[in-house]
Image (spheres, rainbow, N blue to C red):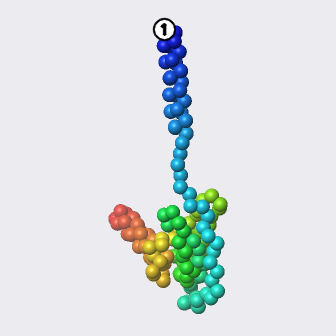
Amino acid sequence: MKSVMKTTLLAAMLLGGISVCAAQVSIGVRIGPPPPVRVVRVQPARPASDFVWIEGYWYPVGNHYKWHQGYWTRPPYEGARWVGPRHDGRQFFEGYWEGDRGRLEHDHRWDKDRDRDRDWERQQQRERDRDRDNRDRDRH
């Protein structure tokens, strides 16, 4: 009886130890920092005075990095400034626009459009107008 108890206790301890060890396992995928920035030797002429130059940068796509050429664009609203993407050695941070009207993440699907980030301002204005119209209608 004593040997059965010892065997059962030993088996319980071993099984409990295995499940605790298994609970500590985690898997993550990291692609590391991007390659060095490509050197741009010739910057195209500014299309108009309200355009700003965005330096080229690497950004993650799946398990690799893709190069985004530098480009001229209009800020999404007056006073917005571009904060370029960066990698701190452990994590990648996307680039974005920021200013007194808030933060706007850059969407790479917009990249075919020269006013790529500009339409956001028009959308924000339409939403403000719609909110104002709703408030006016509620007062009457």
Numbered circles on residues, count: 1
Side (left or right) of 88 relative to 135: right
Q: Looking at the image, which residue is at 52% across and 37% down?
A: 22
Residue that appears at 52% across and 9% down: 2
Residue 101 visible in the current orientation:
no
CA neighbours of label 1 inside 10 A, class few (<14), some (14 to 19), many (20+):
few
Q: Position of residue 63 (x, y in %)?
A: 51, 63
Q: Quadrant of residue 68?
A: bottom right
Residue 34: image x %, image y %?
A: 60, 67
Farthest residue to the front: give it: 3
Residue 115 x/y as whole percent = 48, 81
Q: Quadrant of the C terminus?
A: bottom left
Q: Is residue 105 above or below residue 47?
A: above
1 and 88: which is toward the camera: 1
Q: Is residue 55 above or below residue 19?
A: below
The answer to whether residue 58 shows anywhere in this view is yes
Q: Is residue 12 above or below residue 111?
A: above
Report which residue position mark 1 lands on. 1
Residue type at the position of mark 1? Met
Counting from the top left corner in percent of width and height, residue 117 is at 49, 76
Q: Secondary structure at mark 1?
A: loop
> Quick one: 57 or 31, which is closer to the camera?
31
Instruction: Describe residue 92's horizontal placement relative to residue 138 as left or right.
Output: right
Residue lying at 55% horizontally and 82% vertically, measured from the top left: 71
Q: Residue at x 61, y 70 (%)?
A: 35
Q: Nearer the viewer, residue 50 or 93?
A: 93
Q: For this rendering, which residue is in front, 128 or 97?
A: 97
